[in-house]
Image: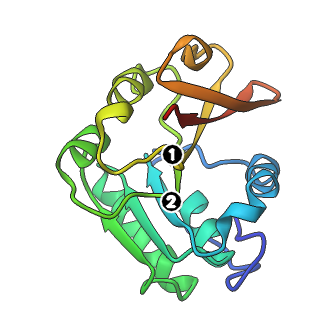
Amino acid sequence: MRVITGSAKGRILKMPGGGQTRPAMDKVKGSTFNIIASLVDGARFLDLFAGSGNLGIEGLSRGGSYGAFVDMSRECARTIKENLQICKLEDKGEVFCMDCMKFLQTTNLEPFDIVFIDPPYLKGLLDPIIKYIPECKLFTSDTLFIIERQKKDIIGIENNPNYKLLDERSYGATVLTFFRLVN
């Protein structure tokens, strides 16, 4: 796994041990950043279920101003810190070793521009987050949410009056869902 472009282009990222994570494939990551390219420069990123930090680090490498990386695994948190150092982006990133819901409910940071949500597939971790997003102070109607999920993981964004579905792309069994909060 490598950084595709930007200040850390070509740097190889470490992976947490023990097969704990399922990193975004380069094809999916590249497509994601092609879609959001005009929004990245200066953006504040939130990488939930961050794993290796792959997505948030790509955003910082491409000109993002700040990245918060949240994962409850100590091994993942340690790996993200190492990857930020490898990419010389540690001054732009902050790692939170905690449950993603707890982070959303207790953290007082400035609102985020782009949020990556990439939980383990089919574990029921998306539903509580999707329900909580509208009341979370970390987001505004300008925040762009990107969920990476398996096709079988139905999230119902299109039927939720709190959300505006912007785009959905399929890559084999993987689906990217892009949405915002409704004003």
| Horizontal arrangement in the rendering, residue 130 relative to residue 108 (left or right) | right
Q: Quadrant of the N terminus?
A: bottom right
Query: In 3D space, how far apart are the residues under numbered discs 1 and 2 (Cα atoms)?
Result: 8 Å
Q: What amino acid is found at the position of numbered circle 2 in the picture?
A: Ser
- Callout 2 secondary element: loop
Residue 50 visible in the picture? no
* Label 1: which secondary element: loop
The label shown at residue 128 is none
Quarter holding residue 104: top left
Q: Residue at x 43, y 46 (%)?
A: 49
Q: Residue at x 40, y 60 (%)?
A: 69
Furthest residue to the left? 106
Compare residues 123 and 161 and report the one nearer the observer.
161
Residue flagged by tag 1: what amino acid is it? Thr
In primary-sequence order, the first of circles 1 and 2 is 1
User: Whole-percent x and y of residue 3?
Assistant: 70, 71
Residue 140 position within the rendered picture, expressed as x and y whole percent measured from the top left: 43, 47
Up the image or down, 21 lies above or below 160; here it is below
Does residue 77 show up? yes
What residue is at 33 percent from the left and 24 percent from the top? 128
For disc 2, the neighbor class at 10 Å (few under 14, some 14 to 19, many from 20) is: many
Q: Kindly check if marks 1 and 2 are in contact, taking CB atoms under 8 A apart as contact.
A: yes
In depth, the one of 171 and 106 nearer the eye is: 106
User: Total label count?
Assistant: 2
Give the residue displayed 53% in from the left and 26% down from the top.
163
The residue carrying mark 2 is: 52
Name the residue beneath numbered marker 1: 21
